[in-house]
Amino acid sequence: MARIEIDKHSGYCFGVVKAIAKAEEHLYSKEELYCLGDIVHNNMEVKRLEKKGMKTVHYEEFAGLKNKKILIRAHGEPPSTYKTAERQGLELVDATCPVVLNLQKRVSKAYQEHKNDGTQILIFGKPGHAEVNGLVGQTQNTAIVVEHLADLVKVDLDRPVIMFSQTTKSLEEYRQLVEAITAGINPAVGFEHYDTICRHMSGRVLQVRDFAAANDLVFFVSDAKSSNGKSLYEACKEVNDNTYFISSPGEVRTIDVAGFQRIGISGATSTPRWLMEEVRREIEKKLQVSGESTQEL
Ligand code: SF4
């Protein structure tokens, strides 16, 4: 008998739960609601909310939008977005995650205190990611975004450095950057670094590894656009080679599930629980076709 388990730690973080709840609250009362960018990096969840009436707009359309109600998602936005919204008479439903909001304030404070003393503000993050754009915006777009060690060529190590991290980055890579800067920076100048990685995220890597190791076959469910999904999938794959990245339940049909005793389903912080449940039903159907019985955990 095969037993199928959904990773109890997987799925939305509280920041995303809050953003979706805010959207649903407005949609429930039939109010017209726009969302700036995908509410979550999961196409299927975006489509579900769009069916309920939410309209996703991207920055080009946002520039021309007037007198509407628009949701700011959990990643947050730079100050320029708030100014545009005000100018265009847009009513904001601000669902910026409180953890991100706090980080924006810290980056802004560091910028205000050091903007005239030659200090470089570094954001360890993915260039172009919405949260990173929101953070860089706190510094009049002067912060330097570093994602890899090779990006340190952009940093003048003879000038002071203050580094923050995007909330969803890897703790290990953050430590490597700190080590490299500490080793290379002129000892006469200061280097402050703040590990601002969300603990919901950093804890997930260890949990997901344990989960993958405890199963014979793992389906990791995520949208290909989710950077968090990509890194958690890689963590699973490192400990269990029988890990498959899928974005929709239909993809289960292409993967051989027969003969596995322990099947696990995990997901990113942007993967809805209902989607993982659908993946479970698809696995059950496949096992029944091959004559195997299943047990849910
Ligand atoms: S990962 Fe953390 S910081 Fe990012 S939205 Fe979720 S709770 Fe907020």
Image (spheres, helix red, strand yellow):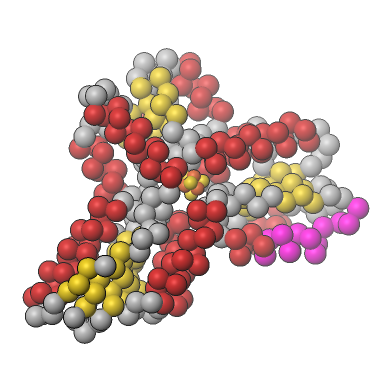
Identity of the residue furthest to the right in this view: 188
Horizontal and vertical percent position of residue 183: 80, 64
Q: Is residue 193 above or below residue 237?
A: above
- Residue 177: in magenta span: yes
Q: Residue at x 26, y 39 (%)?
A: 49
Q: Residue at x 79, y 42 (%)?
A: 119
Q: Residue at x 53, y 21 (%)?
A: 83
Q: Quadrant of the N terminus?
A: bottom left
Q: Is 243 positioned to the left or the right of 166 in the image?
A: left
| Quadrant in the picture for residue 17 | top left
Q: Is 195 positioned to the left or the right of 257 in the image?
A: right
Q: Is residue 94 above or below residue 270?
A: above
Q: What is the magenta segment's predominant secondary structure? A: helix
Could you tell me if residue 123 is visible in this image? Answer: yes
**Residues in magenta?**
176-188
Q: Is 71 positioned to the left or the right of 165 in the image?
A: left
